[in-house]
Every structure is written in structure tokens, then in C-alpha cells.
Image: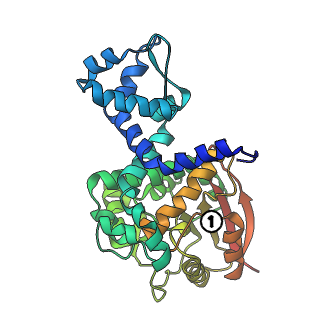
Amino acid sequence: MSKQMSAIEAKYEAQKIAFAPFYFHATIALKELGILDCISKNRRGVLLKEIVDETGLSIYGIKILLEAGIAANLLEENEEGYLFLTSVGQFIRSDRMTEVNLNFTKDVCYSGLASLKDSIVNGKPEGLKVFGNWPTVYQGLSELPKKVKKSWFEFDHFYSDDAFPYALDIVFSENVGQLFDVGGNTGKWAKACCEFDKNVKVKILDLPGQLNVAKDNIINEQYADRVSYHEIDLLDDQQYIPEGAGVVWMSQFLDCFGAHEILSILKRVYEAIDNNARVYILEPFWNNQRFPASRFCLVGTSMYFTCIANGNSKMYHSEEMKEMVVDTGFEVLDTFELIGDSYHTLLKLRKRQ
């Protein structure tokens, strides 16, 4: 907040942080128990008794949640006792971005975030232990509980899918030939490329678990013969990227690594391509956002990387990424900011001539 707060205002903000976990779980309960849906059905508002009758919950339990909802500005109550959703409550109930973020926080991050301090001190994702004993979440991604994995992928895809149609126009404005999708994950970008250009060939480079998911998603498509797979662990700097790419694509990939690892990956990309190849990096840089909410969410996501994902990566500032690009021998040919209706910036690179 830019304005100078009074002591009373500042103390209130401090208490919001102190009690944030309580109100988070109250919000989840209001949503998942159908109370928000019940209240939203009638424009005249809904009485407590109507909520009890519809949900079958106790008066005590509903009162606890309603009072929390009013305190958190999700709900308001008029003098006659009728309850209404506020605009905040409407976003909690039905906004897709908010739903994705809530589920990601609840299912993927909440338990592990208690280990944030230890993760900072030890430089390891100590919160990941709630799911398994992998060095990073990426080795264990295919083995996560179904609900956790669903929330993880929905979060990952939500913040990239809106950028893809515009990115395709940019990438395919020049001849592509062979495209390497580094960190191809579930194969969504590979599929989009093959559907966009009937001649392109795509090689997905990723860990075995992710490649198996991508194969399952692509194997029955008519263009399956144009997609190949290369198993690689890019945390191992002795594993090299193969040659032959006309375009190297990395979407929301480099933010999964610490700075020294990004430098290692970019150096290996540099060594694998010729002077005519193009490299594209698609990232939601936290400093380049239209709205404060986007910046707030991205900065928060950095703590997921610290505590759950790998212990050393983050959502980057655009200038941080550009410095690493230059340090590894590339030049930035173009910067496409906030393409389409997305949160993403697309960097177009080539070897410095």
C-alpha cells in the first residue's frame, strides 16, 4: 500500500496476516460446503434458517463460517438478517483464476509451507517431504496424489494457455522445421504446434515421468508421428541438449530453476544450436504485470518454489532473465510483453553474431 497508514490501520493489517490461515480455511469451507452457492441463489438474500435447511449443517457450524465470511468481507448481512455475497465473495465462488489459486494453495502448498523457514535456511524444498522424498517436485510429479496433481497442472496450465495462441503466431511467422520443446510437461505446447502447422516436427525434452504423460496425451493424435521424445534431466549439467533444432521453446520452464542452473541450461542450448536458430522464453515476469493482483500472486508463487518445488528458484524479474541470457552468449532480438490476454512476456533470442 502506498498511502501512509494510521497505527490502527497498520495494526489491523498485521492481524490479517496473523489470522490468515483461519480465514483461508473458513473460505474453503464456505465454498466446498455449498454455503456460498446457497447465498448466491436469491437476490433478496438468504436467511440463516434457509442455509441450515439446504445444507443440513448445524446452526453452530454455519454461524462460525458466516461470521468469518463477514469479517473477511466475503459476505454482508442487512438489518433483517439477510445474507449476501460481496464482490469478493463472488470472486471466491465463481472466478476461475481465484479457484485455481485456492486449490493450488490448499492441495499443493498449504501443509508444506510450514517448512518455509527451514527451506530458506537449508536451501532445499523441505515442505516437499509431506508428499515424498524426492529432491525436487519434478521427479515426483507423476507420483503425487491425484487431487494434488490435478491442482498442480491446473495452476501450471492456467498461467500459460492464454498466451499460446498469440505465441504460435509469433513463433511460426518464420520457418520452424524442427522445434525442441524443452520442459514439455504434458505436451500441450507440442500439440498446439502440430495442430497449427502441419509440417512442423516437435521433440519434447523432459524427465521420464513427464514424457510418459505427454506420450499418453499425444499417442492417439493423427500427428503423433511428428512428435518425438528425448529423456533428459537438465539438473545434470553433463546431459546435453541434442542438435538439430530450428527453434528451441521454453515455456514457464526456466523459473523452475535457480540462477546457476538457468545459466547452465542456456549454455547447453547455445552449444546445441546453429547461428540461424531461434530461442523463445515465455515467462510471467512479476515486474511486468497489468494488475497488482497478478504481481501479488507471482511473488507468492516464489515461495512455492522455495518450499515445495526445488528450494532455489523463483518468479523472475525480466531484467534478471535478460542478464542471464546475455551472459550465456545470446542477444534478445525482441520482447513481446503481455501477449494476448495473458500474464506472459515472450523473449526471442539468437546467438550473438
Give the quadrant of residue 318: bottom right
For the C terminus, the quadrant is bottom right
Residue 91 spot, x, y in % from top left: 51, 33
Q: Is residue 214 visible?
A: yes
Q: Residue at x 35, y 58 (%)?
A: 111
Residue 95 spot, x, y in % from top left: 49, 35
Residue 188 spot, x, y in % from top left: 44, 55
Coloring applied to the structure: rainbow
**Is 241 left or right of 142, judged from the image as shown?**
right
Q: Nearer the viewer, residue 214 or 139?
A: 139
How many marks are shown on the rendered structure? 1
Q: Nearer the viewer, residue 183 or 127?
A: 127
* Numbered disc 1: secondary structure: loop
**Is 56 left or right of 204, judged from the image as shown?**
left
Q: Amino acid at mark 1?
A: Tyr
Q: Residue at x 54, y 77 (%)?
A: 244
* Residue at the farthest front position: 7
Q: Is residue 311 visible?
A: no
Above or below — where is 155 with respect to 245? above
Q: Residue at x 34, y 51 (%)?
A: 150
* Residue at the farthest bottom position: 238
Q: Residue at x 54, y 56 (%)?
A: 300
Q: Nearer the viewer, residue 76 or 124?
A: 76
The residue tagged 1 is: 316
Above or below — where is 54 with respect to 111? above
Residue 233 spot, x, y in % from top left: 42, 78
Give the quadrant of residue 9: top right
Question: Label 1: how many residues lie within 10 Å, few (<14), some (14-19) or many (20+)?
Answer: many
